[in-house]
Amino acid sequence: MTDHPKAQLSAYLDDELNDEERQQVETHLATCESCQVLLEDLLSIQGDVVKTFQLIQEPADLEIRVLQSIGIEKMPAAAGKGWLYVPLVALLAFGAIWFATGPIFVKLIVGFIKFMMVMVYLASHFISSVPVLSGLTVVLSLIVLTASVYSLRRLFQTTTD
Ligand SMILES: [Zn+2]
């Protein structure tokens, strides 16, 4: 094979090739350094995407850890912003009561507040532990915020069905 199977590398990562195609790609990869580099780039991009989606799709575990951190440890990193959690927790408690009575929009608001608490925790924790990456975190936060708005809209669409 003389051509670099660049278009197939992405399909290869997604496991969308048949046995013959996969073998061709693997044979080429074994001898082609530039395609190995490209594959690693694709892997790293895919890893970032997967991590971001896990962050969005599995907030339940994170939420528990955040609530534990706030309640038990009183994190040093967030100590200066302790006042921030007072209205949030009050809103959360208020929202929980309303949620018990049924309104769907309260469920959305509570979900959003919980999600924002996770984001605040992640942002403060990440910035304090890796100062160099704080700029990157702001960008990532904006992306996650956008994604959270999108998932809220999706949640709203499914709950009104
Ligand atoms: Zn190649």
Image: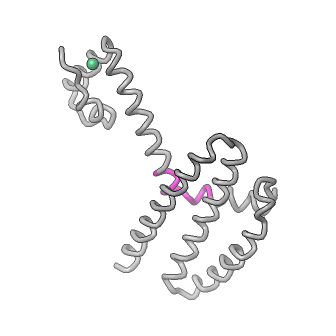
Q: Residue at x 42, y 65 (%)?
A: 150
Q: Colour scheme used in the picture?
A: one colour
Indicate whether 82 appears above or below 102: above
Q: Quadrant of residue 44?
A: top left
- Please, what is the dominant secondary structure of the magenta stretch? helix
The quadrant of the rendering that contains the N terminus is top left
Residue extent of the magenta highlight: 53-62
Q: Residue at x 75, y 61 (%)?
A: 70
Q: Position of residue 74 (x, y in %)?
A: 81, 59
Question: Was residue 2 drawn as part of the magenta stretch in this picture?
Answer: no
Horizontally, residue 103 falls left or right of residue 158, namely right
Q: Nearer the viewer, residue 96 or 44?
A: 44
Indicate whether 154 appears above or below 142: below
Q: Nearer the viewer, residue 133 or 105?
A: 133
Q: Residue at x 23, y 25 (%)?
A: 5
Q: Position of residue 59 (x, y in %)?
A: 56, 58
Indicate whether 91 appears above or below 50: below
Q: Position of residue 123 (x, y in %)?
A: 64, 54
Horizontally, residue 74 falls left or right of residue 108, namely right
Q: Position of residue 133 (x, y in %)?
A: 62, 42
The quadrant of the rendering that contains the C terminus is bottom left
Q: Quadrant of residue 157?
A: bottom left
